Image (cartoon, coloured by chain):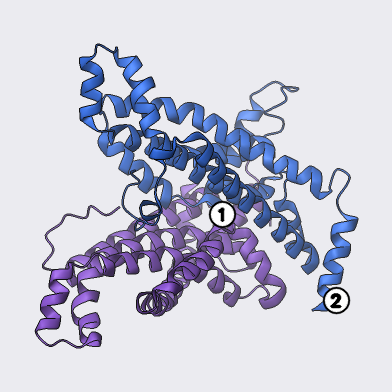
Chain colours: A purple, B blue
Amino acid sequence: MIVAQADGDPFVRWDWIWGHLDLVWEKVLEHLVLTGIALGIGLTVALLLSALALRFRKTYAPITWVTGIAYSIPSLALFAFLVPITGFTILTAEIGLVSYTLLILIRNVVAGIDGVDPAIKEAATGMGYTRRRLFFQIELPLALPVIIAGLRIAGVTTIGLVTVTALIGQGGVGFFILRGLNRFFSTEIVLGTMLSVILAVAVDLSLLGLERILTPWSKRTGSAT
Amino acid sequence: MIDFIGDLLVWFTENWDGQDGYLIRAWNTIRLSALATAVAALIAIPTGALLGHYRRFGVSAVAVVNIGRALPSFGIIALALPITIRIARNVPDGVPIFGSGLGFFPGFIALFALALPPIFTNTYTGIREVDPGTVEAARGMGLPEGKILRSVELPLASPVIIAGLRISAVQVVATSPLAALVAYGGLGRFIVDGFAIQDNIQIFAGALLVAALSILTELLFSRLEKRLVPRPLQLVEEQAAAPIGKPVAA
């Protein structure tokens, strides 16, 4: 079906959007699921690798080097590398999306924990905290603002990248952008782009809210952008 | 596995020349990316420097970064198409750049828009972060404002500005393959066409070329940084590895 827009057609046909709200909702949910999985797995892997890097300092450079390379490969190329192996699947999308979150998350976890005041750590050790309890009950909570700052950037970046996965048959709201391009239908392109921006802002604000709830002691206004 | 590598090598020996060869397409990608970054720099550096010097619109710098990050590059490329097609309709035939509104024109507009924010923000922040004492000293010595900006603030801010240029250039090169979707004959064609005809060899070869180009860009700019920035001003390892999310500042 070709909905090529004629010369006089408006840039955005709102009636088309109102008529397709079901599809919009479905794609928004798909977008959020793709993003959620990527952030969840990304954060888990990043925490494990950061723990390794913090315990064995020598591993930090190679870890950032490898994740840095993954980060600098253009998204389309990264998905293209995976397609011959994993095909047009959600797995291809998620491997790519997760690998983009790692560098940002690991850097912020390590920097956050490094930034914990040594005096606090010493006080905790003096009170008899074991290494493990020190990490989970002192260092990790105090590093949360920096970690969540990283999570916010990873989240906003991932929302944008998910649109690209439309090219490998996934895509969330990127579906509209690609179909709009193929049919020369600007309404869908605008719709997909605007939805992606709205989702990015929503994810950013929710994570900011999460930070407020998790770190009630910090009175900072969200300065980490 | 061995077969795949063999096929890949054959692909690289068979597809290098001609209008659809990877040499021409690589050149097209480089041309488009370089032009978009250069024009963005020509606009963003003077604007950022002036606003930074007069310390105006401080909020704008932060807002620009945030908006830039939230806009999906795929959406920007796609959005450029209906816009350029509309413009091209109103331009008389035969004006080379606009063409039919496909290919180079939308690719350029989109990549230019993507290149602006990092250069602008880094220039603005770089100039603002220059030690006010140094600027005061220059003013006390009777330097006119323009001279202060050119001879004191810009050199001191150069590491941050060049870092912004690098971020933009790398981002532009990374996004440029998507221009294949608006019918531009760059390296992205191999991937996008490969997806369409399910040709794994061509997809993989295209990915290799695109990745190689973006890594080369990264290397080129880190070289440039070492060359252009006076040694005492170069960002040291620790600053370069600062947590992401704070405004870039030297």
Side (left or right) of B218 relative to B5: left
Q: Residue at x 70, y 52 (%)?
A: B188
Q: Residue at x 18, y 77 (%)?
A: A138
Q: Is residue B49 above or below residue B160?
A: above
Q: CA distance from mark 2 to mark 1?
A: 36 Å
Between B29 and A140, the residue placed more toward the observer is A140
Residue B82 horizontal/vertical position (percent): 59, 40
Disc assigned to residue A177: 1
Please rate how many residues cluster around mark 2, counting C-alpha atoms within 10 Å: few if below 14, some from 14 to 19, many from 20: few
Q: Which residue is mark 2?
A: B3
Q: Is residue B144 above or below residue A8?
A: above
Is residue B1 in sight in this rendering? yes
Q: Are marks 2 and 1 on the same chain?
A: no
Between B162 and B15, the residue placed more toward the observer is B162
Q: Amino acid at mark 2?
A: Asp
Res. A58 image quadrant: bottom left
Image mark 1: chain = A
Residue B44 horizontal/vertical position (percent): 44, 30
Side (left or right) of A26 relative to B241: right
Q: Residue at x 18, y 69 (%)?
A: A118
Image mark 2: chain = B
Please rate how many residues cluster around mark 1, counting C-alpha atoms within 10 Å: few if below 14, some from 14 to 19, many from 20: many
